[in-house]
């Protein structure tokens, strides 16, 4: 019962407050009201010609840098070193992948060592979908990923959010190397 009367009293007080404020506005004379200007018109602000030129040149410069970065900058490529029959390459993970392109030979085991130095959560994992590989990359540690490419081509690796990318270029003969499972099934 107390809550109900308290709620009714609060609503009544709120209504009284709103009514009093609108009544005071309604009782103002026309002389006291501020005339409102139409908001549909724009007021021209003249700028010096040198400032217009500087802003235009700066905009064209930024567009040029973006075009160069995304279209014309060369990726950093590295051929994997072969040691005891295993192709090895170290990829530094720091604001992206460096090198972001690794060249390997078809049919030989590959070991990519990812050295993660960037603390951002985007680069805390690497995915190589064509080889069904997804691996976490602990900060300030080197994580090795091993696989054997059986067909020439280009295979992409990405961060966990698919924002940073790299490429594994597999070179080889014009004939793709057949896996051992295919050879066994052909002999049967």
Image (cartoon, rainbow, N blue to C red):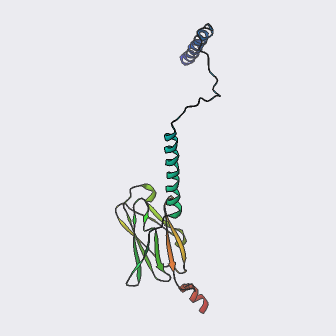
Horizontal relation, residue 102 to residue 142: left or right: right
In the rendered view, would you say 82 is above or below 115?
A: below
Image location (x, y in percent) of residue 132 = 52, 70
Q: Farthest bottom residue?
A: 187
Image location (x, y in percent) of residue 138 = 38, 62
Image location (x, y in percent) of residue 151 = 55, 80
Count of numbered badges drawn on the protein: 0
In the rendered view, would you say 56 is above or below 2?
A: below
In the rendered view, would you say 48 is above or below 103?
A: above
Q: Nearer the viewer, residue 108 or 170?
A: 170
Q: Nearer the viewer, residue 110 or 9?
A: 110
Residue 27: name its quadrant: top right
Looking at the rendered image, the quarter that the C terminus falls into is: bottom right
Q: Nearer the viewer, residue 7 or 182?
A: 182
Q: Residue at x 55, y 76 (%)?
A: 153
Image location (x, y in percent) of residue 65 = 49, 56
Q: Residue at x 34, y 62 (%)?
A: 140
Would you say residue 147 is visible in this rendering? no
Q: Farthest front residue?
A: 49
Residue 116: name its quadrant: bottom left
């Amino acid at each position: 019962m107390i809550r109900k009367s308290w709620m009714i009293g609060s609503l009544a007080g709120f209504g009284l407050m709103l009514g009093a404020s609108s009544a005071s506005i309604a009782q103002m004379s026309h002389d006291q009201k501020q005339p409102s200007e139409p908001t549909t018109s724009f007021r021209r602000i003249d700028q010096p010609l040198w400032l217009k030129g500087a802003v235009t040149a700066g905009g064209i410069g930024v567009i040029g840098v973006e075009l160069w970065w995304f279209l014309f900058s060369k990726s950093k490529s590295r051929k994997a070193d072969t040691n005891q029959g295993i192709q090895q390459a170290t990829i530094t993970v720091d604001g992206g992948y460096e090198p972001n392109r690794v060249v390997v030979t078809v049919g030989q085991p590959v070991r990519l060592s990812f050295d993660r130095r960037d603390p951002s959560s985007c680069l805390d994992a690497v995915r190589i979908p064509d080889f069904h590989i997804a691996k976490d990359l602990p900060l300030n540690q080197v994580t090795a990923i091993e696989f054997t490419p059986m067909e020439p081509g280009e295979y992409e690796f990405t961060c966990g959010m698919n924002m940073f990318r790299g490429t594994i270029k597999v070179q080889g003969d014009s004939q793709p190397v057949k896996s051992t499972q295919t050879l066994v099934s052909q002999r049967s």
